[in-house]
Image (cartoon, helix red, strand yellow):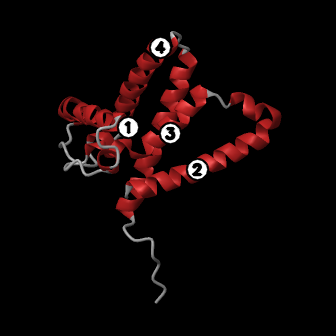
Amino acid sequence: MKAREHLQIHLVILIVVLILTYFLLKERFFEILNFNLLIGISLYFLGAILPDSDSNDKGAYIYVNFKNEPLYYLAHLVSWIELPLSKFVTKRPIKHRESLHTIIGIITTSLFVIISISIIYYFIYKSFLFYWFLIWFVILFVSQFLHLIEDLNKRKYPSWEINFS
């Protein structure tokens, strides 16, 4: 599945969640919208494309469209996690849709990204709240897990067309 499709599906899910949250919280909805939640939403969209940082030819969306930007370098760092992960943990070959497309792969990459962002956050704001660390981790993990589900459906059912003849 192309990154554009992952991002579109994630956007629809996010809109539904925000609408439901608005109707559940009413007045308090705008109280919870703060900078930390915006970081979480950014991580949610990053999770839509992060598992594809293991692409063999570095032709994935995250490499092509974010050339020489922070996400480009983050994707390279995440792809370096794949070597020890595939060699010692998953015992899978190093190629696209292998180690980073597993539960242990998304747990590892989620921890790596969240720890990195938390360190940067601490140095900028001189504060750290552990519950935001947990919230960000869950957001990134769930987003990457959705990516895996989307890829699984594409792999299992290559064509969504139904032949009635």
Which of the 4 image quarters holds residue 41?
top right
Q: At label 3, which amino acid type do we have?
A: Tyr
Q: CA distance from mark 3 to mark 4?
A: 20 Å
Residue 147's label in the rendered image is: none
Foreground mark, 4 or 2?
4
Q: Earlier in the sequence, mark 3 or mark 4?
A: 3
Q: Which residue is mark 1?
A: 103
Q: At label 2, which amino acid type do we have?
A: Ile
Q: In the rendered image, is residue 147 in sight?
A: yes
What x and y, as percent, mark residue 91? 20, 37
What x and y, as percent, mark residue 43? 48, 35
Which of the 4 image quarters holds residue 78?
top left
Q: CA distance from mark 3 to mark 2?
A: 11 Å
Q: Which residue is mark 4?
A: 122
Q: Which residue is mark 2?
A: 13
Q: Is residue 38 left or right of residue 143?
A: right
Residue pictured at 29% horizontal, 38% vertical: 68
Q: CA distance from mark 2 to mark 1?
A: 21 Å
Q: Which residue is mark 3?
A: 44
Q: Earlier in the sequence, mark 3 or mark 2?
A: 2
Q: Secondary structure at mark 3?
A: helix
